[in-house]
C-alpha cells in the first residue's frame, strides 16, 4: 500500500501572519536591504570598539539614524500584517492528503488536487511548509498538523524528490546566495571598520 501523509488543521491568525511576513521577508529587495542594514550595524559596532568615543561624529550619527529606520521596517511590516489579518480573520478548516504523486486538499470553499510537478516554488521552515501551485495557489501546512516527525520527514522528502529539479536547485541556490551575502556583508563591514 502506498504511503500517505495526512494533515488536518484549523488556520489561526498566527499561521496567516507567519505566511504574510514570510512573503515580505523573503523578497529579494528586503533581503538585500537587511544585508545592508546588518553590515552597517556590524560596522558601527566595530567602529565603536576601535575608535571608542571618536565613533560618535556626525557621519556615524547619520548611519545610526539610517540603521534605526532600517530596523523599524520589518517590525512595522509585521504589525501591519497582524492588524490586517485580525480585521478580516475567520478560521478555516483545511485537510491535505499527500502521496508520491502529489496532494489533495479540501477547505470549506474549495477542493482539488495537484501533482508535485505543478509546484512552482516551496519554502520549508521549522514550523511551516509552504507550497506555491499555479499562478496564485498557496498551501500552508503547519508542522503541528502532521501526526509526527516521520510524516514531516516524509513530506519534506517528497517535496525535495518530486518537485521539478530546476525548482529544487533554485531554492538551494537562493540559500547559498543568502549565506554568501551574509559572509560578504560581514567581511566588508569588518574591512571598513578596521581600515
Image (spheres, rainbow, N blue to C red):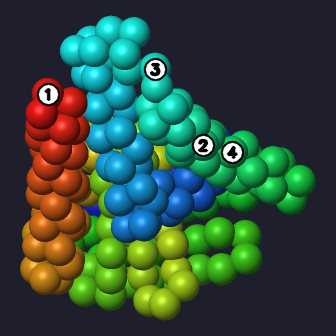
From the image, tell me which residue sits under label 4.
76
Front label number (4 vs 3): 3
**Left or right of 144, for residue 75:** right
**Tag 2: Cα neighbours inside 10 Å, few (<14), some, or many (≥20)?**
few
Marks 4 & 3, CB-CB < 8 Å contact: no
**Tag 4: Cα neighbours inside 10 Å, few (<14), some, or many (≥20)?**
few
> As displayed, is residue 12 above or below residue 65?
below
Of the numbered discs 4 and 2, the one sitting upstream in the chain is: 2
On residue 56, which mark appears?
Answer: 3
Q: Residue at x 65, y 69 (%)?
A: 107
From the image, tell me which residue sits under label 1.
194
> As displayed, is residue 91 above or below residue 108?
above
The secondary element bearing badge 3 is classed as: helix
Distance (Cα) linking label 1 and label 3: 16 Å
Front label number (4 vs 2): 2
**Tag 3: Cα neighbours inside 10 Å, few (<14), some, or many (≥20)?**
some
Q: Position of residue 139 (x, y in %)?
A: 49, 67
Distance (Cα) linking label 4 and label 2: 10 Å
Marks 4 & 1, CB-CB < 8 Å contact: no
Task: State which quarter of the image contains the N terminus.
Answer: bottom left
Of the numbered discs 1 and 3, the one sitting upstream in the chain is: 3
From the image, tell me which residue sits under label 2.
69
Q: Residue at x 19, y 53 (%)?
A: 181
User: Can residue 130 be seen from the camera position used here?
Assistant: no
The secondary element bearing badge 2 is classed as: helix
Distance (Cα) linking label 3 and label 2: 18 Å
Amino acid at each position: 500500500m502506498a504511503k500517505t501523509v495526512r494533515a488536518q488543521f484549523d488556520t489561526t491568525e498566527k499561521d496567516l501572519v507567519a505566511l504574510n511576513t514570510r512573503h515580505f521577508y523573503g523578497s529579494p529587495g528586503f533581503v538585500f536591504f537587511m544585508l545592508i542594514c546588518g553590515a552597517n550595524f556590524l560596522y558601527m559596532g566595530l567602529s565603536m570598539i576601535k575608535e571608542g568615543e571618536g565613533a560618535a561624529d556626525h557621519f556615524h550619527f547619520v548611519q545610526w539614524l539610517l540603521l534605526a529606520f532600517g530596523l523599524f521596517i520589518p517590525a512595522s511590516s509585521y504589525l501591519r500584517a497582524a492588524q490586517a489579518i485580525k480585521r478580516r480573520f475567520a478560521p478555516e478548516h483545511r485537510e491535505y492528503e499527500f502521496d508520491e504523486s502529489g496532494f489533495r486538499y479540501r477547505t470549506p470553499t474549495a477542493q482539488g488536487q495537484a501533482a508535485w510537478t505543478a509546484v512552482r516554488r516551496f519554502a520549508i521552515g521549522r514550523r511551516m511548509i509552504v507550497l506555491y501551485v499555479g499562478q496564485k495557489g498557496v498551501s500552508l501546512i503547519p508542522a503541528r498538523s502532521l501526526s509526527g516527525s516521520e510524516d514531516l520527514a516524509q513530506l519534506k522528502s517528497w517535496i525535495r524528490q518530486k518537485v521539478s529539479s530546476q525548482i529544487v536547485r533554485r531554492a538551494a541556490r537562493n540559500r547559498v546566495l543568502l549565506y554568501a551575502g551574509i559572509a560578504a556583508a560581514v567581511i566588508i563591514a569588518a574591512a571598513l571598520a578596521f581600515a
